[in-house]
Amino acid sequence: MLIKEILEPERALHWVKAKSKKRLLEKIAQQFSDTNPNLNKNELFDAFIERERLGSTGIGEGVAIPHCRISHCNRTMGMLVLLDNGVDYDAIDGNKVDLVFALIAPEESNQEHLNTLKEIAGAFHQETFRDALRKSRNADELFQVAIEQECSQATG
């Protein structure tokens, strides 16, 4: 599943301030619930925290992909966040995280969820993709860069 299939403009957040991983996950849960009334921010936050207890979703190079499967979610959705400053995220390389792609999926969509995670991680492992996102000047540009860069990566 491509980023353009799961990301909406209102879920591309630019220069977000967060002092910690926990505060960042709270903001992400809040934004998901603000853009979809079927989602409960507390349930989302708890699901993200529970997943992080299994191991950090910080994949290195300043990127994290927090994810969970939850009830009351009828389709896979993503959120792209560019932080104003990196936060300590317990990433595998020890670096702070400033790029986040949060992913939520319906509880029963195990294989689709794993396949989508693989696609997202693959995109974020590309240095040109990360750099282009970090150079964006606002939320609209962040969204457009994510869609356009991912498409060019897939065809290139």
Image (cartoon, rainbow, N blue to C red):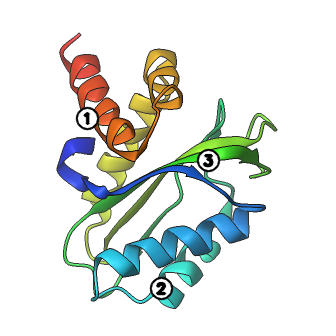
Of mark 3 and mark 2, the one earlier in the sequence is 2
User: On the image, numbered disc 1 is attached to which residue?
Assistant: 147
Residue 119: quadrant of the picture = top left
Q: Which secondary structure, mark 2?
A: helix
How far across and how far down the image is residue 117, in percent?
Answer: 39, 48
* Label 1: few (<14), some (14–19) or many (≥20) C-alpha neighbours in 10 Å: some
Disc number at residue 28?
none
Q: What amino acid type is highlighted by mark number 2? A: Lys
Q: Residue furthest front?
A: 137
Residue 155 as seen in the image, left or right of residue 45:
left
For the residues labelled 3 and 2, the Cα–Cα distance comes to 20 Å
How far across and how far down the image is residue 7, in percent?
Answer: 27, 52
Q: Which secondary structure, mark 3?
A: strand
Disc number at residue 41?
2
- Residue 100 in view (yes/no): yes
Q: What amino acid type is highlighted by mark number 3? A: Leu
For the residues labelled 1 and 2, the Cα–Cα distance comes to 26 Å
How far across and how far down the image is residue 114, in percent?
Answer: 36, 53
Residue 99 as seen in the image, left or right of residue 9:
right
Residue 49: quadrant of the picture = bottom right
Which residue shows up at 24% across the image and 27% down it?
148
Q: What amino acid type is highlighted by mark number 1? A: Ile
Which residue shows up at 38% across the image and 81% down it?
33
For the residues labelled 1 and 3, the Cα–Cα distance comes to 19 Å
User: On the image, numbered disc 3 is attached to which residue?
Assistant: 83
Which residue shows up at 64% across the image and 42% down it?
98
